Amino acid sequence: MSQRAPLAQELTRAARAIEALAAGRSLQVALDRVLTEADAAVPPASHAAIRDLAWRTCREFGLVRELARLLNARPPAAAPAALQWVALAQMVGRVRPDAVLVDETVQAARALPGGPALSGFLNATLRRFGRERELLLATARRAPEARWNHPAWWITRLREAWPQDWERILAAGNAPAPLTLRVNRRRTMVDDWLGRLDAAGLAGRRVGAQAVALDCAVPVHTLPGWSEGLLSVQDAGAQLAAPLLDPQDGERILDACAAPGGKSTHLLELADVELVALDSDAARLDQVRENLGRLGLKAHCLAGDAAQPAQWWDGRPFDRILVDAPCTASGILRRRPDARWLRRRGDPATLAQRQQTILQALWPTLRPGGTLLYVTCSVFPEEGEWVLAHFLDAQPDAFRESLWFDPASGAAGADDSDGRCGKPLATLLPVAETARDHDGFFFARLRKRS
Ligand SMILES: C[S@@+](CC[C@H](N)C(=O)[O-])C[C@H]1O[C@@H](n2cnc3c(N)ncnc32)[C@H](O)[C@@H]1O
């Protein structure tokens, strides 16, 4: 086991990743880059600590930026600003004694261009935060962005769209995400696997037909049955998509936005189908292949643009199509905390245009009488009901079927399926009414008139 780097170096690395986030880049990608930079290798023992420093800052990004505005006479340059945010996030969370944190941050600042002046600035502002913590926190939290750690436009939009639920949606986006698994019903029963989990000294609870949430996250490869293909990582809400499409043996199915393959592999676990897994991102398609291989499943993986079927469609109609369209990810913020800071006010409308284009382009590839399930992991109406309304206006041979969801059992289906037993389902908000916790999604099932 290697030695950890000094805290000052860990802070510097985390700040570099946060600087990239502030410039509009994915935090995950920025961290991967920072941790593999060739110039000064980071000891592996420090990787988890650096990731933790950065993700904590990301989760408190609204608050620490507001605190910095209150503390700073004028805005610092990008690098010291990021270092200050990382340090403030630590101090807000009281992760370690203030004195240690301030000293290490001052050390880290000395290595930046303009070091001595910057270390004085960080020393003064962080010590002031330590002295006036409660007052500064109370003042900062008067700003909605700091109170909720979401962009102000995002809060306003949720408030308009979901006047009863917006606070619970925001809180869900800030909550830690459970590790939720899908048990492969081709290989084992959920209860049998829960028995193996118990025997391994781990605890989990059923949160859907095939879904189990673990009480404590562990590395997935250590879970019983992982290497045998018994499990996939997939949120309980995401696990509703494949059953809602309702694949039947022998059918030809298109998963039009397939990577990394969570829903493709679920469809293949439910029925013996000929599956075409399409994605425009060839690198992400490798993840689909990897997941198929681990689970012992087969699909035809195609790199292509769902909005341009002429480039990849062989002309044979599909019986069913899943469109899990690219979206803002506003329903899954607890799993993608940086998404809120990367999006801009106009993005829901821009993405709605893309979603609409994809739907229109794919519709001719569906056979008459066929079924299309439109899904996004978003709770913004622009990407759900609005897209659907436009699509149905333009497509007289399409009709929408009613869906239901039963929070008690975690099951979902269409009205034409046996045993309707839940409440109407379209937008599934990420606010669980029972212990069956899930992310937020939009689902709509369309049929093509024969
Ligand atoms: C929400 S993710 C899909 C998640 C996947 N269905 C699963 O369950 O694992 C959206 C995917 O759409 C892909 N994508 C974006 N635009 C696309 C397009 N025009 N055609 C095909 N795929 C696209 C992205 O590369 C991304 O992998």
Image: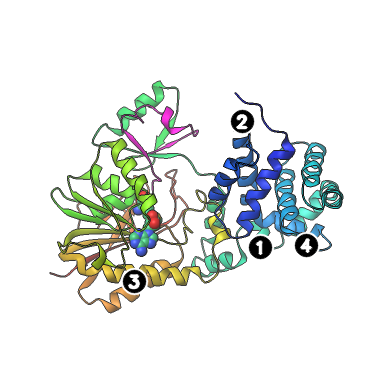
Disc 3 from disc 1: Cα separation? 35 Å
Residue 69, image x, y percentages:
77, 61
- The CA span between labels 3 and 4 is 42 Å
The rendered magenta stretch, by its main secondary structure, is classed as loop
| On-image quarter of the N terminus | top right
The mark nearer the N terminus, 3 or 2, is: 2
Chain-order first, disc 1 or disc 4: 4
Q: Residue 78 versus residue 413: which sits nearer the camera? A: 78
Is tag 3's residue or tag 1's residue first in the polypeptide sequence? 1
Name the side, left or right, on which 127 lies relative to 262. Answer: right
Q: Is the residue marked 3 within 8 Å of ligand 1, measured from its CB?
A: no
**Residue at left 28%, top 78%?**
394
Q: Residue at x 66, y 26 (%)?
A: 3
Asked if the residue under mark 4 is in contact with the one under mark 3, i.e. CB atoms within 8 Å, the reply is no
Q: Position of residue 363 (x, y in %)?
A: 24, 68
Q: Which mark is residue 75?
A: 4
Circle 3 is placed at which residue position? 357
**Amino acid type, mark 2:** Ala
Which residue is identified by label 1?
144
Task: Check disc 2 and report the residue beneath it.
Answer: 45
Quarter holding the C terminus?
A: bottom left
Residue 31 is labelled as none
Foreground pick, 18 / 149: 18
